[in-house]
Image (spheres, helix red, strand yellow):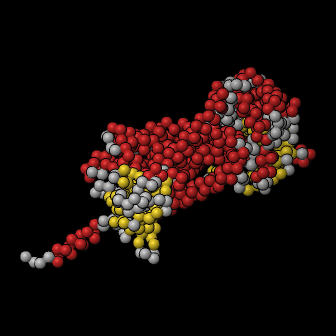
Amino acid sequence: MDQLRQNSLVRIRNLHFSHGDRVIFDGIDMDIPHGQITAIMGPSGTGKTTLLKLIAGQLVPDIGTIEVDGHDIQRLPTSQLYKLRMRMGMLFQSGALLTDLDVFDNVAFPLREHTRLNNAMIRKLVLLKLEAVGLRGARHLMPAELSGGMARRVALARAIALDPMMMMYDEPFSGQDPISMGVLVQLIRQLNRAAHISSILVSHDIHETLQIADYIYMIDGGKIISQGAPQSLQTQQDAWTDQFIQGRPDGPVAFHYAAPPLADDLLESAP
Amino acid sequence: MIRFITAVGHSTLQLLTSLGRASLLLLAMLRGLPSVLKRPRLLIDQMHSVGVLTISIVSISGLFVGMVLALQSHHILSRFGADSALGLMVAAALIRELGPVLSALLFTGRAGSALTAEIGLMKATEQLSSLEMMAVNPKYHILAPRFLASFLSVPLLAALFSSLGVLGGWLVGGVILGVDEAAFWGGMQGGIDLRNDLINGVIKSITFGFVCAWIAIYQGYDCVPTSEGVSRATTRTVVQTSMAVLGLDFILTALMFNH
Amino acid sequence: MVKNRLIETGVGLFVLIGFGALLFLAIQVSGLGEFYQDESFKVTARFDNIGGLKTNAPVTIAGVEVGRVQDIHYDPEEFRAVATLNIQNRYHGHIPDDTFAKILTAGLLGEKYIGLQPGGSEDPLTQGGEITITQSSLVLEEIIGQFLFSKSQEPLP
């Protein structure tokens, strides 16, 4: 474990973050190692997306530090931060393709912005990236003409256009049909195993996440509830983790929103 | 009572913070202008969607405003036997006031609200966020070209509005009502001064262009990223720009024509 | 690519139309460059009171516009106003040098303009010449004052 910590790509220490009055993170330590798929799981609204934005430096923590590849994200001047971001890819939940550009131009966008490659070279690279996600034939479509799963695959091709050292996936499986889900699982695994892209995966889809993650953090109520390799989590006795993984409707996370006993409420005369 | 004071204080603070945010955004966009000039393609696309697509509404409105102005003025001026002042009256009203003000209002309705909605939707669909993640500053890449395009388009549209208004006035006054054409143009040329009237009118429309662009883009960028938030922001753009343009018009008129 | 070309053409046209409109306003509406130096000649006229005459006001002969007032300034030595008139070149040599210049009002409320009334001299006005016989603008207050004064001079009935 110490070896792993030495080797981590992202190092989060004592992270506190709140949005207005709502506390989202209340002291989180996390290490994301090189070359692995690390999953962050938890119920909706626990700020998993916020965590990705903190890592990317789009948000600034209240207390605590976040280091990416040895750089303290908050202390980094903007130009350096932008340089670091060129080496990070992020797949947004909606895909976030630029709606006024077609598929080809969307994937070409980061290359045109950040490299001085000529058009022929850009064309080759874009076609290769699109081939990797299986959408080379869809290069003339506009984002509005794509299904949700296809849009995510195009966005993935765009995110890896600059060959990043790490990828962040924000709920890549939510709202997908089983086939697109399978395609995405396979793509994420391929990118990690073949291209050695370290990956951070934020999700609440247990089945798929357990399939591909090397290490999992469970977050709820601003704290890390449990962590470990998928096998160890599945056998864990912690009641909350058990409820989440098994998807039981009632347990430590109650089915009922906090309320007085039903009988009292019913018997109470209307005001 | 205390609640009232708290509410006033709260909304004042909110106003101040949003003004501060808007100013910071403006600074960031101004800093992005050099990078826009390096990539004229971005500016040209925006000039098209902001300016070219507004030409038709501005031209038609200008023509009709000029025609109505001529009809109404002729009605009153002919009572005093001052028909010859018709050209001057139409041109002065258009160049000093109606051209800059109405074209700014039309611009907001047609292009400003669309800008807000577009930027708001880009925010809601995480496009702005994704640009940041691709190490592209959306303030430079998305906002600055839109700002510059609007800023440049409004004065040109105002000039178009006034010109067509004058032509509309001539059509009604000179051709239909039969006012002496030499008197119409002569009175106009005699009474309209290049510096006092035309240049001041252009200064007005440049100011309005700045305000229109700033408010529309700020509202889009600052909106709550939901469909409801975007629609509210669009409404706010139209309301705030109209009030700002009319208020500024009063101040500018007082400063310019106060001697 | 075709679409790009269309957009570029549209924007180019827009900018052209916009500046064209500005040019139209400057030339046709505000009368800039109506008579340039090479197409006109200048004469001056001195008035006791210009009474609201403005630059760019028309200069007419027999009701026909022949030029414009280019400049008005005050001569502190003579205590009079000096108006510089730009007259179209085609009238050069056709306006006698004893021409009479009056400041008139178009209609009851209209703009002030200068009316020239040619005299009988053989010698014409030329570039840089001066109109010596002038009549100032009628100032309503003065006329009323004179009227009241003359009334008070009359013997009581």
Residue B187 in picture, x, y percent from top left: 38, 51
| Residue at figure coordinates x 74%, y 21% from the top left | A137
Q: Is residue A137 above or below residue A259?
A: above
- Most distant residue in the right direction: A3
| Residue at figure coordinates x 68%, y 42% from the top left | B40
Q: Is residue B17 above or below residue A112?
A: below
Classify residue A109 by image quadrant. Answer: top right
Quick one: C121 or B53, which is closer to the camera? Answer: C121
Residue C3 in picture, x, y percent from top left: 64, 29
Image quadrant holding the N terminus of chain C, namely top right
Image quadrant holding the C terminus of chain C, namely bottom left
Q: Is residue B44 above or below residue B240?
A: above
| Residue at figure coordinates x 42%, y 44% from the top left | B166
Residue B135 in picture, x, y percent from top left: 75, 44
Please give left or right for residue A64 compared with residue A197 in the image.
left
Q: Tally the numbered discs.
A: 0
Please give left or right for residue A132 compared with residue B152 in the image.
right
On the question of residue B173 being in view, the answer is yes
| Residue at figure coordinates x 30%, y 67% from the top left | C139
Quick one: A88 or B56, which is closer to the camera? Answer: B56
Q: Is residue A237 above or below residue B80?
A: above
- Most distant residue in the left direction: C157
On the question of residue A248 being in view, the answer is no
Please give left or right for residue A145 compared with residue C42 in the image.
right
Residue B28 in picture, x, y percent from top left: 66, 53
